[in-house]
Image (cartoon, rainbow, N blue to C red):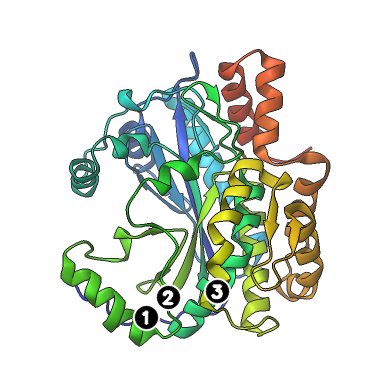
Amino acid sequence: MPLGPFKASSALTMGVELELQLVNPTDFDLSDSAADILHLLDRKPFPGDVKPEMTQSMIEISTDVHFRHDELLAQLQRMRNALLAAGDRLNVAICGGGTHPFQRWFHQRIFEKPRFQQLSTLYGYLAKQFTVFGQHVHIGCASADDALVLLHGLNRYLPHFIALSASSPYSQGVDTLFDSARLNSVFAFPLSGRAPFILDWQQFESGYFAKMEKTGVVNSMKDFYWDIRPKPEFGTIELRVCDTPLTVERAAALAAYLQALCRMLLARREPLPVEDDYLVYNYNRFQACRFGLDGVIIHPRTSETMSLREDILATLRRVELDAEVLRSRPALDEIRAILGQSGNDAAFLRRECAEEGGVQGMVEAAVRRFRQGDEP
């Protein structure tokens, strides 16, 4: 179908989607409980949206549209509490994390929904291997061209979000040595990676998308698994590289950090993006996935080699005023805590695996953390 016009929305509004794990509280393996959870939640109002995902051991929750970090966080906490109450009734545990550390992909069952069945037929075993869990953040854009400027302007900062959210060090029972192994599963899909460099919406719509649609490869923007993609029906850009954090507090902080960065980019406090910015894109992306906050990246304009941790700290100083205007200073404090003593969730999971003596204890710790949040 034709892509259609870009539906402009209020600039810098934000919404969050979280893919969550459904876990058996006895052995801490994944549980095919999505249908039961969704049926129970459907019986009374849920403070947001909840729907199935690719396999029956996962669900996705979505917030309303927000401008302020504190309001986004409050809704995420209400949604978490409603999920926990439903899970307790059904004896199903719920947690974050980009991968489940020891589930076997071939045991997963595709959810009975036509689109998921179609994708399973198309992608074969990749569909079941896509039992991975991400956070998607939408940022509202006042125009389609603003959306494309943000989409490409953010490529420089993509490693920040990979490293800060990384929570998938284990897969299929082993330590992958990656902080974010989840993105390796996403990268296997043929329409993943980066968007083509186009800064004019009419050219994107009537040129690139129309040609892709004519090939029969795509029917809508849903068919692209890009790291960042425009969503014309929402009037947003959608950041898709984050692992699902272990707490909703961290998820809200990541969204607010993205919002502040977008405000800086829309204020044109950086040069407009150019195609050559992508020369080091895959290298920087790999460094963030593999080494997390200890990664070393290359600045696309200066070719300077930089510590990822230090680059994030420098960027936080640059968006301090933006966060002040957006009333999201507490979110930046949360980001600084990740860079400091707290570390990212991949580091937490590795510590728990060592202290608990294995991957089952690690999942139990993730379940506790989702329930308790970041409150002391």
The tag earlier along the polypeptide, 1 or 2, is 1
Q: Is residue 342 above or below residue 274?
A: above
**Where residue 191 appears, x then y in whole percent?**
33, 57
Q: Is residue 3 above or below residue 344?
A: below
Label 1 with label 2: CB-CB less than 8 Å: yes
Residue for point 23% across, 75% down: 211
Q: Secondary structure at mark 2?
A: loop
List the residue tagged with mark 1: 6
Q: Is residue 66 visible to the viewer in this orientation of the structure? A: no
**Residue 297 picture quarter:** bottom right
Q: Quadrant of the C terminus?
A: top right
Residue for point 55% across, 74% down: 276
Q: Amino acid at mark 1?
A: Phe
- Total number of numbered discs in the rendering: 3
- The one of 356 and 248 positioned closer to us in this rendering: 356
Residue for point 74% across, 76% down: 325
The tag earlier along the polypeptide, 1 or 3, is 1
Q: Amino acid at mark 3?
A: Asp
- Would residue 168 appear left or right of 185 to someone viewing this image? right
Q: Secondary structure at mark 3?
A: helix
- Would residue 313 appear left or right of 64 to someone viewing this image? right
**Where residue 296 appears, x then y in whole percent?**
71, 51
List the residue tagged with mark 2: 235
**Where residue 277 appears, x then y in whole percent?**
57, 71
Q: Secondary structure at mark 1?
A: loop
Q: Amino acid at mark 2?
A: Gly
**Residue 11 picture quarter:** bottom right
Q: Neighbour class for label 2 at 10 Å: few (<14), some, many (≥20)?
A: many
